[in-house]
Amino acid sequence: MDVFKEILNFSIVDFADVFLVALLLYSSYKLLKGTVAINIFIGIILIYFTWRITDFLNMKLLSIIIDGFMSVGIIALIVVFQPEIRKFLLMIGSTNISKKGSFIKKINFLKTQENIATDINAIVNASQNMSESKTGALIIIERNNSLNFLLDTGDQMNISVTQPILESIFFKNSPLHDGAIIIANNTIKATRVVLPINNDNQIPNRFGLRHKAAIGITEKTDALAIVVSEETGHISYIKNGEFISYDNQNKLSDLIQEDLN
């Protein structure tokens, strides 16, 4: 009877409480999806439920052990999830609610499938041509985290992604070739963008500023980066601050398609 009374007393505040918790869990999952940290996140959820079950069943010894782990584990979690926490705070801070449109649409981790599909073949084919001519390029593809905070560092654009446009931007004599371009929803949002540089000494010296910038932005956000080396012509694909290996051009297209979905 007490359970039924609690259900009948379920208020709007209780509904909001449940909704916000569900939203937090969903956004956390979206943020960690595709990373090694997702396994840690799932493990934490399992440990938490185990802790609650042992407490409910009055299993005192096991409950005390897990309770001690949960008490001191928060510090370890902050260290382990430091990159993800930084991405989450950046995602919230870069949400601009002053522009037109509803607040819900501006929350980047709630993006729907209404987004225009990015022309991956145009990006990969352009990268391949630039690789053959050893034309340096840095292409950043936005995913869930908004990159609007970077637009002011370059020249804002509104150009549909095509292979000739990409190649003309990075042409050596083009005034737009220096810096990175940002692509979102098959639109080039900005050129000559200045990205944060990763100064990690563990990065081999053979990688220049383009690669360090690509590592830096993919560490701080969930963006994808494609770098064409001006020295070797090699095409690097970078995600979560790491180089992703691939066998051929088709495999690279498949990887980008999978990550964008």
Image (cartoon, helix red, strand yellow):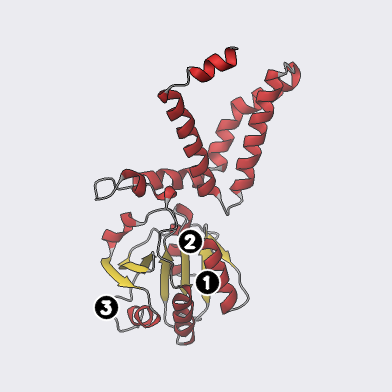
In front of the other: 178 or 157: 157
Q: Amino acid at mark 3?
A: Pro
Residue 201 x/y as whole percent: 52, 59
Marks 2/1: CA distance?
A: 11 Å
Element under label 1?
Answer: strand
Q: Is residue 199 visible?
A: no
Q: Is residue 157 left or right of residue 67?
A: left
Q: Amino acid at mark 1?
A: Ser
Element under label 2?
Answer: helix
**Where is residue 152, by image quadrant?**
bottom left
Residue 160 x/y as whole percent: 33, 73
Element under label 3?
Answer: loop
Sequence-wise, the earlier of marks 3 and 1 is 3
User: Pointer 2: residues within 10 angstroms few (<14), some, or many (20+)?
Assistant: many
Q: Is residue 65 left or right of residue 30?
A: right
Sequence-wise, the earlier of marks 2 and 1 is 2
Picture quarter with the N terminus: top right
Sequence-wise, the earlier of marks 3 and 2 is 3
Image position of 157 with respect to 60: above or below: below
Residue denoted by label 2: 215
Residue 181 x/y as whole percent: 36, 69
